[in-house]
Image (cartoon, coloured by chain):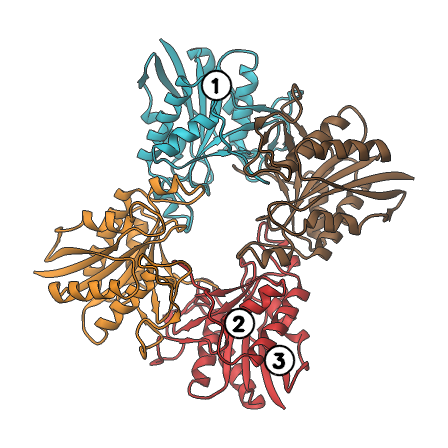
Chain colours: A orange, B cyan, C brown, D red
Amino acid sequence: MTTILLTGFEPFENEPINPSWEAVRRLDGLKLSSAYIVTRQLPCVFGAALVALDHALAAYQPALVIGVGQAGGRADLSIERVAINVNDARIADNNGQQPIDTPVVPGGPAAYFSTLPIKAMAHALRTSGIPASISQTAGTFVCNHVFYGLMHRLAGTNVRAGFIHIPYLPEQAARHPGQPSLALDTVVAGLELALRTAIATGKDLRETGGQLN
Amino acid sequence: MTTILLTGFEPFENEPINPSWEAVRRLDGLKLSSAYIVTRQLPCVFGAALVALDHALAAYQPALVIGVGQAGGRADLSIERVAINVNDARIADNNGQQPIDTPVVPGGPAAYFSTLPIKAMAHALRTSGIPASISQTAGTFVCNHVFYGLMHRLAGTNVRAGFIHIPYLPEQAARHPGQPSLALDTVVAGLELALRTAIATGKDLRETGGQLN
Amino acid sequence: MTTILLTGFEPFENEPINPSWEAVRRLDGLKLSSAYIVTRQLPCVFGAALVALDHALAAYQPALVIGVGQAGGRADLSIERVAINVNDARIADNNGQQPIDTPVVPGGPAAYFSTLPIKAMAHALRTSGIPASISQTAGTFVCNHVFYGLMHRLAGTNVRAGFIHIPYLPEQAARHPGQPSLALDTVVAGLELALRTAIATGKDLRETGGQLN
Amino acid sequence: MTTILLTGFEPFENEPINPSWEAVRRLDGLKLSSAYIVTRQLPCVFGAALVALDHALAAYQPALVIGVGQAGGRADLSIERVAINVNDARIADNNGQQPIDTPVVPGGPAAYFSTLPIKAMAHALRTSGIPASISQTAGTFVCNHVFYGLMHRLAGTNVRAGFIHIPYLPEQAARHPGQPSLALDTVVAGLELALRTAIATGKDLRETGGQLN
């Protein structure tokens, strides 16, 4: 039995909940073929989020890790392609820190690509009627920070890992006029299908997920 | 026992379904205090849609009517404020017609305002966690055509009526990258709450739902 | 020699300038075939804007009137199709007033259509390389207030009139990240061409400018 | 006298012109303090664009290089932060190639950061009234391909380099309803100011240019 680690975040930016944690916790304990899902909530704090991640990695020794985060303004499950080695915070984190143009890991490489079959995952979701796309940027806030830190820790191992951004829940969008949302059930179903696809897929699908600019 | 008429549309523009009909049919037969919901699917065809509406109005003699239509690209339940007396079709309707700058009703007034308590309805939805807003335009396609035709037929009566635009369903958005969506359950709950609010509200709420431009 | 009246607005919502007045004043005194352009700045104040408009109409007895207003967030010259009889202010005007769901003209019709050849104007602009489109709503703030008030005053006369919304200038967009803009020269050229087209066009072009929703 | 190399692209995706080349060629031969601007048009072709870039680098031995490219849909001068080692073409390039998930440089690092003072440049532009922002992704088409290839060639040298995406010109936006644009004069002034700022700035400004997601 192998272990899959899913992380979500605590709420930030005045939100009472964070849909990433609401979705991830619903998958806690689920068995997918020969794997078992464990979950961990991370603080929305530069540095402390990676400490919490380290504890989870040490405790669970997962074979697969997916970080999940809230992306207010996006309309679908955005499967991230790349994490970059920079913190540039437009707002303060939950501990009042607002780093600008600092590295996530001093001396680390400029970026890491997701080691998940991102095209197969996006394809499987869309085929099942769940809005999904490839994203070329995870931003420069705590989500990218965790995504980069995760990939750095796992570099050189055969543990596969990546990151998925999810929209607001409808009850959040009700307070942000005009912003898109997805129902929690849809997100949970999407994350489960993404995991199943990641487990089942060796070589990724060859299907465009690019952007002109 | 009074009757509430809800209309939805058949699919158009290459969609296999129309979320307005999928939502409306789920409310068929529901009792709300002393009222009873009846539903009717309208063709997405200029002229024929109003013929079908006339049959439904004659058959049911409703005390309240809400037309519902698909608004691909919108993120919430858009409660329409005003219907205008113009048909201007960017694409052909389901019968191949593409009227440009013709009146819905020759000689009719330029516009009709919804006679529903639109602010109270939007407020009730948002308070219940369902994304909703006031919209200042229902477009110039078959939805506005039906909305205008509906208000023209009911002008001078005490039958209250209006129109609500709804987003794509997630399975539609999965084929339209980046487009927002709402789950069918959310839309159905929103329409029911909108109806209950319309029934319960006499004088509308005084709360801004305006736009600068 | 006939007279054409162009109106622009004073700045509002913390802007140091209003591009509508910056553009309009540049056209003051211009002769277009047998017509002569006069201009007037209107206050961004419900009520007072229409008093100023009345003075200008009385003073100039124009044969053609176009109101111009700033539409932050829009990307092109938006030629408005319809003015509606409602004030619904999302923010306070320059006099601290914030009317909600009051009529522009008590007892007036629900709406007036522009009496300009809006399709021919949009077509001429685009053909000349100036971004332009038909807009189905002028909002519910002071721009729509002036547009409606203007059409009401001219109803039954043969004076043609309408309204055009314009984007931010680049220097405004520089303070509103991600917002579109047009250069003042482009807007001025566009307004002049729109006027020339309005003068030269009797029956409007038959070309779609509609929206699905 | 040092040399500054500016590159633009030939037109692609059915456009008759490419604003990047139209702007860049206007700056050809300009002297900025002790530097001299040379320009080169690159083909919108994977591989061939880098061959042309190599020729220009060899011919001019520039001390500073900025690639410029068209970004239809963006509203400002987008100063790119990072180039990633992937080609993923949503459409075919001008030679009919459509690579999917291939590296720009096999075995190259995952990404390179711009070595320009991107925050100081964006700040200078906005302060001068020219819309500008930091962008976290240059896409995965030929622009990113050139940006990555450029940074790879210059890695380990003291030649500074980066990439700037620019919007459509107004005449292009006139054919793409709703798309933002900037006038050629504004773009040319912005590029010149960006260059002057890059030359004058050693350590970059500490100002947020980040995104939450």
Query: Relative to C51, is B73 above or below?
Result: below
Measured in 3D between alpha carbons, the distance from the residue under mark 1 to the one under mark 3, in whole angstroms, is 67 Å
Query: Relative to B94, is D136 above or below?
Result: below
Judging depth in this view, the residue of C61 and B51 nearest the camera is C61
Q: Nearer the viewer, mark 2 or mark 3?
A: 2
Give the residue at x 42% y 38%.
Answer: B76
Classify 10 Å Cα crowding around label 3: few (below 14), some (14-19), many (20 and above).
many
Judging depth in this view, the residue of C210 and C108 nearest the camera is C108
Disc tally is 3
Q: Earlier in the sequence, mark 2 or mark 3?
A: 3
Residue C50 visible? The answer is yes
Image side of residue D101 versus residue C110, left or right: left
Percent of width and height locating residue D3:
60, 87
Classify 10 Å Cα crowding around label 1: few (below 14), some (14-19), many (20 and above).
few
Percent of width and height locating residue D159:
50, 86
Task: Give, as a three-letter code, the residue at label 2.
Answer: Ala
Chain bearing tag 2 is D
